[in-house]
Image (cartoon, helix red, strand yellow):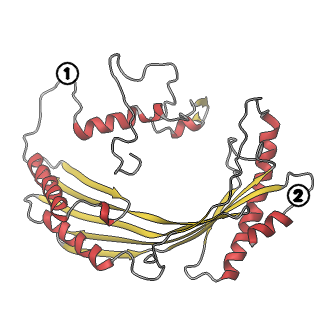
Amino acid sequence: QEMKRAQENLDLPGAPGIYYIRGHLMNLDRVFVSASMGSFESLRTSPVRQAAIEVRVGTAEFDNTGFGGWETGRLRSRLPVDADPAVVRRVAWSLADRAYKNAVEQYARKEAVFQPPPEHPGDFEVLTPTVYRVADASVVPGSDPLGLPMVISMAEELSGVFSGVEGLELGQVDLVAGVGTVQVVDTLGTDVTTLAGGMRLRAAGHARAADGMLLTDHRTWSVPDYAGLPELDVLKAEVNGLGQELSRRAQLPRFEEEYVGPVLFEDEAALELFRSVLFGQLEGSPDVLPFETWLGDMGQGMFSSTGGGGARLGRRVLPPGWRVVDDPQAQPEQMGG
């Protein structure tokens, strides 16, 4: 109701009108659990109630989106955990009002410098409205869909594996889980509610070598839900292997001699090498090269995932003879695989 009211009433003299508004409503329950060496440490719950509004002005052929800047026409705001309709309406109207003004400003910036080419596909495609409600009735805000007793027991049992490993200073398990729904509605009649959430399980250990060097390592599992986790015995074996490896490293002799020669990257080190060197160069929109000022490097390059170097367009990234294959279906069970 508020989106329709905004579309009909929000208007600035000489500014393009609103042709589309989309709203998002998130209801998510989250839990954070920590256990160390078999003992429960902390439990924190954090419900998320959030609304977001997207406003498009102009036409589907040319609107305020797809142009550099931050005035994108999308804004979000938190809601009270038990928000009544009056609160939701007030937040939605306020978001729509501010998002519309931002969208008008961004439209003017875009119109001033961008002329669509003849083959321009347009900025938005208006589709047939979709109505869908997830059938999982167990996701009810205020209930216990996260299964807190099970979560706490799992964290305690896994962290207890570390207590059987000699020489560890820390053996901790942290579990973050969230479950809920996201509802998406728009001024065309779309009304879609889907499940939201996921969980991350992290086991971390610390050991100290005889010379005082602190050695750390961890294992992390990120899955959509509990069913995506390995069996408990498998998790215990992984945690035990992590602890035993740290204990073994702590007892190794210190390498004193100077070494000059090749370095071979294996396992996690190889993954980290590719993550830091290659990912930023293969993105669809690589980081912009920085430009120099008396303040130092500026532009998107200063926040580059590749360390501030920006995209190496037309330049070599890896040595000759190397081959990289990107297969999104290689590990479909992995989030973002």
CA separation in Å, label 1 and label 2:
68 Å
Q: Point out the frontmost of discs 1 and 2.
A: 2
What x and y, as percent, mark residue 315? 48, 19
> Is residue 290 rendered to the left or right of residue 327?
right
Question: Any mark on residue 220, and which?
Answer: none
Q: Could you tell me the amino acid type at mark 1?
A: Val
Outermost residue on the right side: it is: 13
Q: Residue at x 73, y 60 (%)?
A: 21
Q: Residues within 10 Å of mark 1 (few under 14, many from 20)?
A: few
Q: Is residue 262 above or below residue 222?
A: above
Residue assigned mark 1: 260
What x and y, as percent, mark residue 150? 27, 76
Q: Residue at x 86, y 66 (%)?
A: 9
Residue assigned mark 2: 12
- Label 1's element? loop
Q: Is residue 231 above or below residue 311?
A: below
Q: N-terminal of the two: label 1 or label 2?
A: 2
Instruction: Say which of 249 and 161 sits in front.
Output: 161
Q: Could you tell me the amino acid type at mark 2?
A: Leu
